[in-house]
Image (tube, helix red, strand yellow):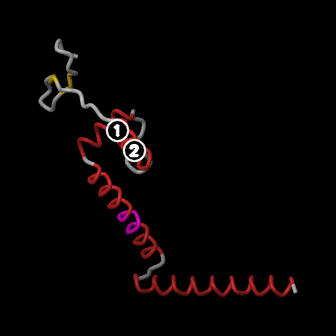
């Protein structure tokens, strides 16, 4: 801390700068804590950091940016997984959709057989 009590932070210019502390109400701390807990597994910059550090990240990047990052990352992972399967089984997206519909129909038939079999044994 500097002589006037304001904390010092290292700026991007490599120099120390005095900054005024941010004062949060209890409700704000709780909201931010819940946000961090909800996204700690998906947002690597929250992992292994204190709540104070996570709050600073949120203030710097913004909650909307973090949510956008997570959503985009999930979509990219799904697209990558689908692309890998298409390539592995030499399928087009249309073939994969047809296969998924057939799989779902087969599952429904299996469930109906189990239900009918259970009813018959109970009677």
Q: Position of residue 115 (x, y in %)?
A: 74, 83
Query: What's the residue at 70%, 86% (across, down)?
Result: 112
Q: How crowded is mark 2: few (under 14 residues within 10 Å), some or many (20 or more)?
A: many
Residue sitting at the far top: 3
Instruction: Tell me if residue 7 is in the magenta stretch.
Output: no
Question: Where is mark 1, residue-wise?
Answer: 54
| Image quarter of the N terminus | top left
Q: How far apart are marks 2 and 1 (CA)?
A: 7 Å
Q: What mark, if any, has residue 85 been given in the picture? A: none
Query: What's the residue at 41%, 49% (across, down)?
Result: 39
Q: Nearer the viewer, residue 29 or 74?
A: 29
| Label 2: element kind | helix
Instruction: Examine the image and state in which quarter residue 54 appears.
Output: top left
Q: Where is residue 27 in the image (x, y as percent from the top left)?
A: 37, 40
Whichever of labels 2 and 1 marks the residue nearer the N terminus, that label is 2
Q: Position of residue 77 (x, y in %)?
A: 39, 63
**77 relative position to 64: left or right:** right
Query: What's the residue at 45%, 86% (across, down)?
Result: 95
Q: How crowded is mark 1: few (under 14 residues within 10 Å), some or many (20 or more)?
A: many
Q: Which of 109 and 2 is in front in this view?
A: 2
State which region is magenta.
75-80
Question: Where is mark 2, residue-wise?
Answer: 36
**91 relative position to 113: left or right:** left
| Image quarter of the C terminus | bottom right
Name the chief secondary structure element in magenta.
Answer: helix
When the figure is inspected, residue 32 is found, relative to residue 17, above or below; the finding is below
Q: Do the residues labelled 2 and 1 touch (CB within 8 Å)?
A: yes
| Label 1: element kind | helix
Q: Where is residue 90 in the image (x, y as percent from the top left)?
A: 44, 80
């Amino acid at each position: 801390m500097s002589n006037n009590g304001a904390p010092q932070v290292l700026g991007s210019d490599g120099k120390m700068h005095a900054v005024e502390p941010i004062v949060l109400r209890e409700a704000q701390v709780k909201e931010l804590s819940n946000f961090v807990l909800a996204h700690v597994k998906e947002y690597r910059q929250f992992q292994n950091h204190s709540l104070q550090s996570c709050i600073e990240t949120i203030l710097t990047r913004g909650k909307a940016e973090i949510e956008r990052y997570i959503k985009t990352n999930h979509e990219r992972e799904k697209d990558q997984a689908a692309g890998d399967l298409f390539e592995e089984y030499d399928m087009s997206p249309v073939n994969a959709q047809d296969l998924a519909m057939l799989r779902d129909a087969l599952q429904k038939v299996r469930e109906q057989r189990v239900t009918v079999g259970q009813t018959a044994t109970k009677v």
